Amino acid sequence: MDARHLRTACEKTIRVLLQAPFRFTRETRGMQAGSEVYRLAGGAVDVRVCVAIRGRLRPGDLAQLAAVGPANACDHRLVFADYVTPPVAEKLKQSGIWYADAQGNVFLSVPGALLLQVAGNRPARVAAPKGQHFSAPGAKVLHHLLKHGPRVRATYRDIRGTVGVSIDKIGKVVRELEAARALRVHGRGDVEILDGDRLLRLWTDAFAAKLLPELRIGRFAAADGFDPGALLRQAEKALGSAFVVGHEVAADAWTGHLRPGSLRLYIPEERTAAVLKDLRLAPTNAGRIELCRLYADGIRGEKRIRNTAIADPAFVYGELTAADDDRLADTARRLREERLAWTL
């Protein structure tokens, strides 16, 4: 469901429940992409409501929604979504954020004046996103655009050389995003991202559902215990500079705001056996060390831990939001504010 139809559906969810004298009307478009300003008025109530339009609402979105605070002098925050699951609904209420979804679930509360609350409506099925971007190759293109945005100076041939995706696929993704008004192509090798927030959400969905499962090699435990520093030194001896550190260790390097509880290394897949031997790793589903295939050097950021490259902020943001973990969600919020502020 596109943003316009989602907005209409969520407005209907609220309005069919409101009784006179209350009115819920759209006042003006918000300052940020994907946001609107509404007025809820009637009786003694007259408040401005900032509405974030999120479509598929991921648990990782909650920290950012809670941290922004009422913008544009709004009195309340509200989120429109395709479907708000019961656990997410509870977290929204705890954070003081109203919600309405296209399934008829809603929560609005003005103490002493108004309470709208409906829960338990579920979609017949949760439709997966569709489009050229929602694939492993599409995710690689999205990441390249976000890493180099908001103005990307690269031809399709340049992007192919960086991420290993065919020129045909790159063209289809770019045209799809241009038709959705998420970006504008100014000419050969010149792309301007118009809606960084939307592009970032598309990237997190595609990374979690399509790209990460393709890249995973496995989870492992180290014979000498979990010591990220020692493991990185061993990896440097085994691989030199031919690997990239991602996820929690990379997030801590970028923000200084996370005690890593796991280690994710992106390595050349053909070196897996050597890495397992040199780092003394044993496979286990409960392992705190994860090995993933390094599909392109393009995920390297400019920051390093000693001599080891870490993944760039856009890539790490996708990693953090792929997990339903409040601790990682808060770090993702900080990472975006500090390193990807142009997407806000």
Image (cartoon, grey):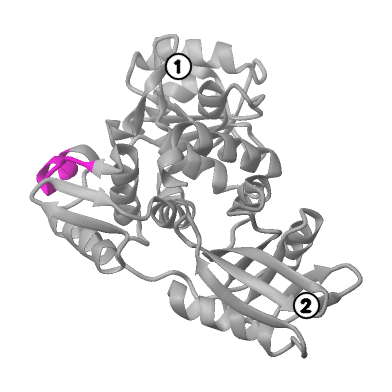
Could you say which quadrant of the image residue 249 lies in? top right
Pointer 2 local density, CA inside 10 Å: few below 14, some 14–19, many at least 20: some
Give me the disc on residue 188. none
Tell me where residue 92 appears, x and y as whole percent.
Answer: 74, 59
Q: Which residue is drawn at the image coordinates 63% and 75% (left, top)?
A: 101
- At mark 1, the secondary structure is helix
Tell me where residue 259 appears, x and y as whole percent.
Answer: 67, 24
Query: In the picture provided, is 233 more to the left or to the right than 112?
Result: left
Extreme-right residue of the structure: 112
Q: Which residue is drawn at the image coordinates 50% and 60% (left, top)?
A: 30
Taking depth in this image into account, of 216 and 308 the one nearest to the observer is: 308
Amino acid type at image mark 2: Ala
Taking depth in this image into account, of 44 and 193 the one nearest to the observer is: 44
Predominant SS of the magenta segment:
helix
Circle 1 residue: 235
- Residue 342 part of the magenta-drawn span: no
Magenta part of the chain: 152-161
